[in-house]
Image: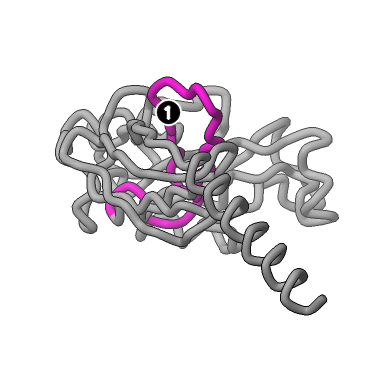
Amino acid sequence: MKAIFKSISIIFLVFYSLNCFSQRIEVSGKIIVFDSIPIVNADVIVKSTKEIFKTNNRGVFKCECNEKDKLIVIAKGFNKYTLKVKKKSNELIGNLKLAKIPRAAEIAIDKGHILMVDSFKKLAKKNSGQKDYSKYISIMDVIRNEFPSLQISNSGIIIRGKSSLIGSSAANIEIDGVITDYSSLSGLSPTNIAKIEIIKGSDTAIYGVRGGNGVVKITTKK
């Protein structure tokens, strides 16, 4: 009885192994960013076997995996991306996105993932919402020209209305997430500013009482 059971087990394992082997397929794909720029030397990890394959200078990879397998794509400076394999997959395309961390684009370049550096930098800047303020001499010059409705005085920036006779109507200043004073603006260079936002109305609720006169929110290039 034991011999029969052993024989059945062996036969089952043989058929199972053959079935698994028959499901192995070869797939190819391309890993890109901004719909067109190849990501070089990215790790493409087969989930079922943990095998790692690399993308070439065109962002292309080839690997063997199981049907309905998953491929995990990892590259420094980018969010992790998952590709789902199908039995009759055409070339798989992974369109990665930059990670929401400081200097993500610079990290991607430094790690050798990008060969089309100039095009990548332009698209990264465009998609980040950053503006080029380098043509201005000072931060006050930026504010006067980019936000002409604001009032600038020696004591602060007024977003709405005139200064109160009782208290200040100056907006709060936030630099890289930290509320600071008006004098801190003098230390900022226009070339180091990524974004300036004027927060007013109901959007100031997150600042509580401090947001009553609005907030000038400045993000620098980190």
Q: Count of labels shown?
A: 1
Q: Is residue 199 magenta?
A: no
Q: Around disc 1, counting alpha carbons within 10 Å, would you say few (fewer than 14), some (14 to 19), or many (20 or more)? A: some
Q: Which of 169 and 188 is in front in this view?
A: 188
In the picture, the quarter occupied by the C terminus is bottom left
Residue in the picture at 65% in, 35% down: 159
Instruction: Inspect the magenta stretch and tell me whether residue 89 lies in it.
Output: yes
Place of residue 24 in the rendered image (x, y in percent of width and height, measured from the top left): 46, 42
| Residue at figure coordinates x 53%, y 48% from the top left | 18
Hey, which quadrant is residue 181 in on the image?
A: bottom right
Residue shown at 46%/61% (left/top)?
Answer: 50
Location of residue 201 (image quadrant): top right
Three-letter amino acid code at disc 1? Leu
Image coordinates for residue 71, horizontal then vertical, percent: 48, 46
Residue behind mark 1: 92
In front here: 118 or 50?
Answer: 50
Decide: is 75 above or below 87. below
Highlighted magenta segment, given as a residue range: 79-106
Residue drawn at the location 55% of the way across and 54% of the way down: 17
Name of the residue lying farthest toward the bottom = 2
Q: Can residue 188 be seen in this view?
A: no
